[in-house]
Image (cartoon, rainbow, N blue to C red):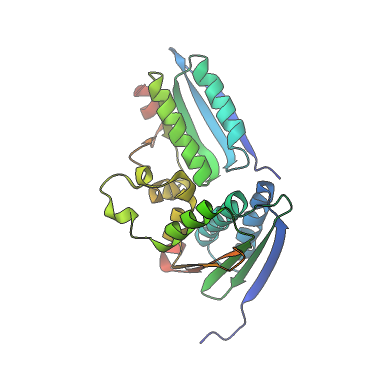
Amino acid sequence: MLSQIELQYEDIKDKSNAKIIRFVGDLDATNVEKVVEKVFSLLNSGIVNIVADFERLRYVNSTGLGILLHFSKSAKEKGGCFKIVNVNENVYEIIEIIGATTLLEIYDELDEVINSL
Amino acid sequence: MESTKPYKIALSFPGNLEYVSPVRKFISEILIRRSFSEKFAYRSEVIVDEICTNAICYGCKSSNAIIHFTCFIHEDRIEFEIKDEGGKSEDLNRLKVAVDDPKERQKSTLSPFKEMEKECLGLEIVKMLSEKIDLDIDENNVTTIRIERKCKAVDNL
């Protein structure tokens, strides 16, 4: 049984090369491939500034975290960014354990991250 | 001294990643039903996920490999035991280093993530979330990992 993850997209006003992606569900080894495909499809289409809203991301494991770091690196290489917002306490703890809080750009508020683009 | 016997759950499942999600969620649900905090259950779910994923990715040589997972739930702690058929020698060596050299990462002044092998990330998380981790590899390379996690005050915050 694959873990359920849904990605919901939202445009950002006056920023044609940016999008909000809302992650809903669990991100683990069974569904990273699907997520990689969708995020890279955006990056390759010129949407290089991505805001990942984790408000409804319940769970992430080490495979999922590895992919988030990969997104961040790839977006930067394309002249953009991959910024994360609304991370719940449990998910943040796992990011912290692997020492990735300094490698990922994490924000508390959606307005704050949009203004930073 | 503990007055009651631990509650035991034993599961055997094919070496396929699709089984990991139901197993981790099942253990988490059982812990909550047995009055452990949601945080303790979540952290335990992460441990179960990482050790099962590791066993499937690196401990299943044959296509019909079976993973044997056992969980002992005590009043104040939980123990996991996972057994696989053993992987290639380089995977076993990497596992030994990951389990036996917990101090290696701390020697670095760089970010821990950069220092870790991607494949060992999961075990690093397990080590950080547990008190004890033991590895046993028998003469046939059958690999058993035992993990103990105590329920602490921080799990209830």
Position of the N terminus of chain A, as image quadrant, is top right
Horizontal placement of B155 versus B71: left or right? left
Q: Give the residue at x 37% y 21%.
A: A117
Give the quarter of the image for residue B32. Answer: bottom right
Q: Where B3 sits versus B64, above or below?
A: below
Towards the viewer: A58 or B128: B128
Tell me residue A15's x, y (percent).
43, 14
Tell me residue B150's x, y (percent).
47, 70
For the image shown, how many numbered marks are present on the structure? Answer: 0
From this viewpoint, is residue A8 visible?
Answer: no
From this viewpoint, is residue B133 visible?
Answer: yes
View extreme (right): residue: B64
Towards the viewer: A46 or A114: A46
Q: Give the residue at x 51% y 74%.
A: B76
Q: Where A14 sits versus A24, above or below?
A: above
Tell me residue B85's x, y (percent).
64, 60
Horizontal placement of B82 versus B66: left or right? left
Give the quarter of the image for residue A49. Answer: top left
Q: Give the residue at x 49% y 25%.
A: A20
Tell me residue B139's x, y (percent).
59, 68
